[in-house]
Every structure is written in C-alpha cells, then in structure tokens.
Image: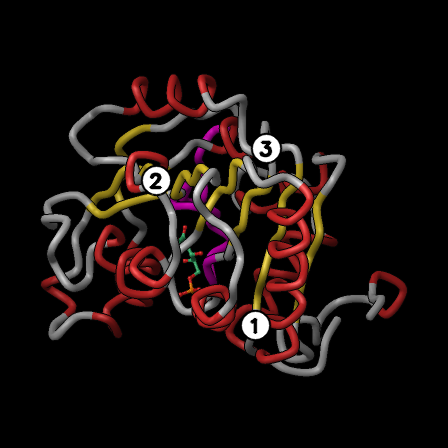
C-alpha cells in the first residue's frame, strides 16, 4: 500500500521503466481510464526508448471512431503515444467490429504479454469483463454493465452518450500475461479491491481471478486499501 495516488503512479512508473530498460522489446498491456493517467504522465515525460516496445490495449468502446475524444484510441494517442517514440505498427487496440480472433493472434505472434497494466471497476470488472464473464473468456464484444455506464458517464456530456457495448480482451487472455500490475486508487474502489483480493474467487467479481495468477503486483493508495486486512499490506 502507498499513501497517495501520486505515490502509486510513481511506483507504477518505476516498474514499467525498469521493465522497458531490461527488455527493450517488452510486450506491454495497457489500460485506460482515470487510474493510469499519472503513470502515463510520467512515461510521457520520461526518456525511455519505446521504438521496439509492442503494446496491446485491454479494450475499446463500440461505435466510437478512433478520433472520437472519448475513444480509447484517442486516449492512448493523447496521453502516451504522441509523446514517445513508439512505432505505430507496434500498438494494438481491439476494435469492436468482431476482430477478437485477429487480436489474439497478434498477441500470440508477439510472444504473449510480458506485463499487463490493469485497473479495476467499482463492480470488480477487469478490462470490460463485467461480472458473470467466464474466466476462460477471450477477446470479444461485450455489453457494458449498468454500473460501468453510470461510472463512465463522467467522461461524456450525457449518460445517453456512453456506448452500451465494447470489445475487451478476455479474462483468459489477461491471465496469460506473465506479470500483471493492478492499480486502484480512491475510496470508490475499496470494496471492489477487498472483494477481489480477500473474497471468494467467483465470476461475480471478475478481478478475484487474479488470486489464481502467480505473478500479480497490486498497487493501492490508502483509500483503496482501506477495507483490506492488515496482514495483506506491504509498502
Ligand atoms: C480500461 C479498463 C477498465 C478500467 C476500470 C477502472 O481500459 O479496462 O477496466 O481500468 O474501469 O477505470 P478508472 O481507472 O477510470 O477508475
């Protein structure tokens, strides 16, 4: 556990930077949303060599063009890709037009994901794998949960503008990553974090599957960790 959002972002930066320096050909899984913004701000300002790094994003909304200000294509360009020397052909964001199999093939061709960055939804989702998603699921089109639509309405003018569906890497896909770095900050995530890390492993809480992964690093601020038993916490 770390004291603040900035401390979480700083630690996440240290992890990603060390990995890219150690393996310039890193295959990096990326998340969007509010949580990784501090990490991306640090990466954007850094001097890492991204030229041989390959990236795979977790998800993308259906029905938004890549140029739409709320699309995850736009988010990645705005917050990271335009600031670093990444090779555009090495960046991959799923498209919601049913190309899940092709996306999976690209991950396999890249040799699998070395380090996957994850956030967590207040309902326990990872990527857009909502409660009830199978632990074996692969990259596919999904409907968003009402809670996710409500939570993500903050990025749109009106809740009616939030897409109802998306394409997401599956839970099975995510679990094949060699290392997973889960980031969560704020009181609003405390219950989901507690259910994911110290509750039963159940498809009702997709992130609880991470208890079965051999190499997960969890970065939490105090508020997100506030419902965890003390024995689970290190700094
Ligand atoms: C984003 C993603 C989602 C978010 C989650 C938390 O690519 O896959 O699972 O990580 O909804 O979002 P924030 O960080 O906005 O609270």
Up the image or down, 209 lies above or below 35; here it is above
Q: Which residue is mark 2?
A: 91
Q: Position of residue 75 (x, y in %)?
A: 28, 60
Up the image or down, 86 lies above or below 96; here it is below
Write the start and end of the magenta stretch as one range.
Answer: 121-135
In the picture, measured across the screen, residue 103 lies left or right of residue 27, that is left
Q: Which residue is mark 3?
A: 177
Give the secondary structure at mark 2: strand
Q: Which mark is residue 185?
A: 1
Which secondary structure class fits the magenta region best?
A: loop
Q: Quadrant of residue 161?
A: bottom left
Q: Position of residue 10 (x, y in %)?
A: 63, 72
Tell me whether the residue at label 1 lies in contact with that at label 3, contact meaning CB atoms closer than 8 angstroms: no
Instruction: Quadrant for the C terminus, please.
Output: bottom right
In the picture, measured across the screen, residue 234 lies left or right of residue 88, that is right
Which residue appears farthest toward the right when viewing the image? 231
31 in magenta: no
As measured in the structure, the alpha-carbon distance from the residue carrying label 1 to the one carrying label 3 is: 22 Å
Q: Earlier in the sequence, mark 3 or mark 2?
A: 2
- Asked if the residue at label 1 sits under 8 Å from ligand 1, the reply is yes
The image's colouring method is secondary structure
User: How would you rate the neighbour count of disc 2 (Cα within 10 Å): few for under 14, some for 14-19, many for 20 or more?
Assistant: some
């Amino acid at each position: 556990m770390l004291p603040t959002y900035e401390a979480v972002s700083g630690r996440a930066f240290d992890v990603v930077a060390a990995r890219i320096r150690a393996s310039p050909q890193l295959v990096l899984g990326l998340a969007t949303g509010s949580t990784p913004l501090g990490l991306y701000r640090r990466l954007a300002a850094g001097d890492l060599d991204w030229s041989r790094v390959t990236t795979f994003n977790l998800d993308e909304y259906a029905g938004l063009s890549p140029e739409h200000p709320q699309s995850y294509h736009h988010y990645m360009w705005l917050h990271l890709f335009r600031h670093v020397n990444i090779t555009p052909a090495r960046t991959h964001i799923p498209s919601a037009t049913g190309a899940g199999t092709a996306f999976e093939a690209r991950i396999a061709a890249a040799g699998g994901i070395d380090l996957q960055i994850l956030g967590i939804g207040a309902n326990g989702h990872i990527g857009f794998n909502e409660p009830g998603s199978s632990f074996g699921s692969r990259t596919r089109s999904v409907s968003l949960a009402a809670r996710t639509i409500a939570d993500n309405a903050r990025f749109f003018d009106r809740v009616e503008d939030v897409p109802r569906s998306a394409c997401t890497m599956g839970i099975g896909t995510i679990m094949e990553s060699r290392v997973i770095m889960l980031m969560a900050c704020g009181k609003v995530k405390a219950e989901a974090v507690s259910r994911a890390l110290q509750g039963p492993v159940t498809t009702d809480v997709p992130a609880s599957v991470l208890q079965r992964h051999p190499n997960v690093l969890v970065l939490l601020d105090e508020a997100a960790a506030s419902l965890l038993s003390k024995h689970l916490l290190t700094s």
